[in-house]
Image (cartoon, rainbow, N blue to C red):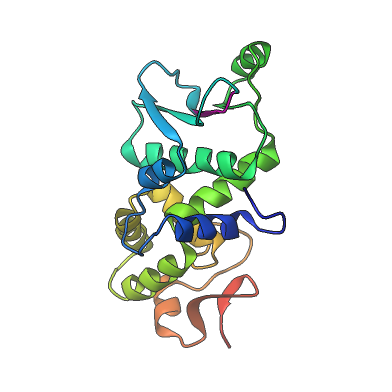
């Protein structure tokens, strides 16, 4: 049960503590689900428009997360974490469907399914990001790897491998934490070499920028 004043990130951190996460990577999201009595089913017959769903009906003793088996492992892991976010944060919803097409949404609503709201999706994504990529560990490994790698792409791939997530998920995580700038924008940002060499920049958030002085 989420604490009313908690952010999705704080809730994910609490879940990590409650399930005995030791800090060893990657986070075992399947073990976390098991400890919460959430059953995971991977199926090949889910359509391309359906990456996963959370089933929480009265006739089910425990919640069930269904994941598309054909997806890459890193995507399945994120889907499970995302659906766990719905399970923890959005109590009381009977069925939650992850779909991308309007036709599928109409069909699922007719059969009793509920499409999560945009805000619920944002919350579930924030939860999943913190669950799989805890900020404290991201910052620690970022500090260690930023001086060892020669390009942003290499840095992203290295961290993505450590946390067993996709490169794109890691890139978004680094940008959302203020550790990496978006690849384009109206503002001129310092180059990678500037960020590594200058004492004015550090992998810490300060007003949404990486400036420390």
Q: Is residue 124 left or right of residue 158?
A: right
Q: Nearer the viewer, residue 22 or 195?
A: 22
Q: Is residue 30 left or right of residue 210?
A: left
Question: Which residue is at the far right?
Answer: 5
Identify which residue is drawn at 66% across, 58% down: 6
Compared to residue 27, the image places residue 90 above or below, namely above
Give the number of marks. Answer: 0
In the rendered image, residue 67 lying in the magenta stretch gets the answer no
Q: Is residue 182 visible?
A: no
Q: Is residue 23 left or right of residue 83?
A: left
Helix, strand or loop: magenta stretch: strand
The segment highlighted magenta reads: 53-57
Q: Quadrant of residue 73?
A: top left
Q: Nearer the viewer, residue 69 or 39?
A: 39
Identify which residue is drawn at 35% across, 42% down: 74
Q: Position of residue 66 (x, y in %)?
A: 45, 27
Identify which residue is drawn at 50% across, 73% down: 190
Q: Quadrant of residue 9?
A: bottom right
Compared to residue 155, the image places residue 75 above or below, namely above
Q: Is the C terminus in the top left, top right, bottom left or bottom right quadrant? A: bottom right
Q: Quadrant of residue 44?
A: top left
Q: Position of residue 27 (x, y in %)?
A: 36, 54
Q: Position of residue 86 (x, y in %)?
A: 58, 39
Q: Is residue 161 left or right of residue 210?
A: left
Q: Is residue 118 visible?
A: yes
Identify which residue is drawn at 52% across, 64% down: 181
Q: Position of residue 31 (x, y in %)?
A: 36, 45
Q: Nearer the viewer, residue 44 or 142?
A: 44
């Amino acid at each position: 049960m989420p604490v009313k004043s908690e952010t999705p990130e704080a809730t994910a951190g609490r879940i990590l503590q409650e399930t005995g996460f030791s800090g060893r990577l990657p986070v075992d999201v399947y073990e976390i689900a098991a400890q919460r009595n959430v059953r995971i089913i991977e199926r090949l017959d889910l359509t391309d428009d359906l990456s996963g769903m959370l089933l929480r009906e009265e006739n089910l003793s425990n919640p069930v997360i269904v994941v598309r088996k054909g997806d890459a492992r890193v995507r399945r892991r994120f889907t499970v974490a995302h659906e766990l976010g719905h399970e923890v944060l959005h109590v009381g919803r009977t069925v939650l469907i992850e779909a991308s097409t309007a036709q599928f949404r109409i069909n699922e609503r007719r059969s009793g399914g509920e499409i999560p709201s945009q805000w619920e999706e944002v919350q579930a994504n924030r939860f999943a990001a913190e669950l799989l990529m805890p900020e404290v560990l991201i910052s620690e490994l970022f500090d260690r790897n930023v001086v060892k790698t020669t390009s942003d792409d290499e840095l992203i791939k290295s961290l993505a491998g450590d946390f067993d997530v996709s490169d794109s998920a890691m890139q978004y995580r680094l940008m959302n934490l203020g550790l990496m700038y978006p690849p384009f924008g109206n503002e001129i940002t310092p180059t990678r070499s500037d960020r590594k060499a200058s004492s004015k920049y550090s992998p810490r958030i300060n007003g949404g920028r990486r400036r420390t002085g």
